[in-house]
Amino acid sequence: MADRLVVVGASLAGLRAIEAVRADGWTGSVALIGAEEHLPYDRPPLSKDYLAADECADPTYREERKLTEELGAELLLGSPASALDVHECTVSVGERVVPYDALVIATGSHARELPGTRGLGGVFTIRTLDDAKALRVALRRGKPKVTVVGGGFIGSELAAVGRTLGLPVTVVERHATPLAGAVGEEMGQALTRLHERNGTRVLVDAQVEEVVGDDHVRAVKLADGTEIETDILVAGVGAAPSTGWLENSALTVDDGVVADARLAAAPRVHVAGDIARWPNALFDDVLRGPMRLQHWTSASEQGSRAALNAVSPDRARAYETVPYFWSDWYSSRIQFTGIPASDTHAVDVEVVAGDHTEGGPFTALYRANDRIIGALAVDMRAEVMKYRRLIAARTPWADAMEFARTRRRKAAARRSA
């Protein structure tokens, strides 16, 4: 059993790593390394309530005393890890060398920027608490025109915030259907209609050719010649795993850090959160190769499992999960569990409750290899977790459909009672 655990990444996964080993009774020393000066904080609200609410709650998970006294963590915040030596079992933080017996890497990801916009006023990404603070102030300065580049979930949440604040918002999406890769073509169109019903302008098949401005953004010019007057430009073009500091570490870095089923990337080194690529056995019949997730739920689960495996390798267990995430747009809650696509089989999607064409609540199920692999729900909050259990059990499609029919009959009976 290890005597010293070092966690790199003062994130949700990093926090859960420390909490898990303490809850398990492990009494060794712990150090938490974080690039930001902030204590670990909750990221999902940063693109939602933190921006939209008149008064924003403190997103910090735990006060410093809880981390240092109750969890016994040494906090090394404000400087990023700069190198890893897996042979000497050390992490470098600037000039400081931090030794470990067990290491959990949870450095997460960083927002991608639009080319040529660094240093230009009025251009924002949203990933960190400082990003959110700056954007929150800008959104309340007059009545700015907002352009969001990228119609994915983060971009869509930001667009919804702008409209909630009464601002004119345009979403620029380079694909024909926003979110087609995340939920499929038909369901992507259904979600896009939420924008249209709430007054958000959505431009698809649109390529940004130039961001116009000297010191401050003035407009966004598209490849077809369209020019969009803009006071605030938000890049919602995805995030990349923060693995640059690991390039010479002997770990396998390939769109994240490649690990085994127990989240081990090397002897005494485990990974968790956005950077982890590992084989998820629950989907080995429909996916080839490892999976990387960027969701709150999986980060929390992986942080705990990686740390427990790291300090007690004799009790190490494989990590398996059915992915789950949620997104809040306007007054709607969107939830997805499972996976929307397969490397090995065609995927069919069937709406089993509600009507996705009318703008009301609905639930859709995803099928591959004759079993349920995913479920999408809009404003049907009680549904998704039930289907998550079916996905985890590799439930055959016929049984999943019978389950859905039973739920429809029960819902109809309640309405008529």
Image (cartoon, helix red, strand yellow):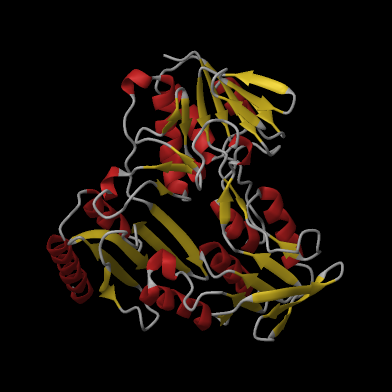
Of 33 and 210, which appears nearest the observer?
A: 210
Instruction: Identify the image quadrant of residue 141.
Output: bottom right
Report the label total.
0
Residue 60 coordinates in the image, percent (x, y): 61, 41
Residue depicted at x 43% and y 66%: 181
Residue 330 coordinates in the image, percent (x, y): 52, 71
Residue depicted at x 44% and y 58%: 326
Q: Looking at the image, is 200 positioned above or below residue 257?
A: below
412 left or right of 278 in image: left
Of 34 and 370, which appears nearest the observer?
A: 370
Of 391 and 268, which appears nearest the observer?
A: 268
206 left or right of 77 in image: left
What is the residue that sits farthest to the bottom in this orientation?
Answer: 225
The quadrant of the rendering that contains the N terminus is: top left
What is the residue that sits farthest to the right in this orientation?
Answer: 215
Q: Looking at the image, is 109 positioned above or below residue 343?
A: above
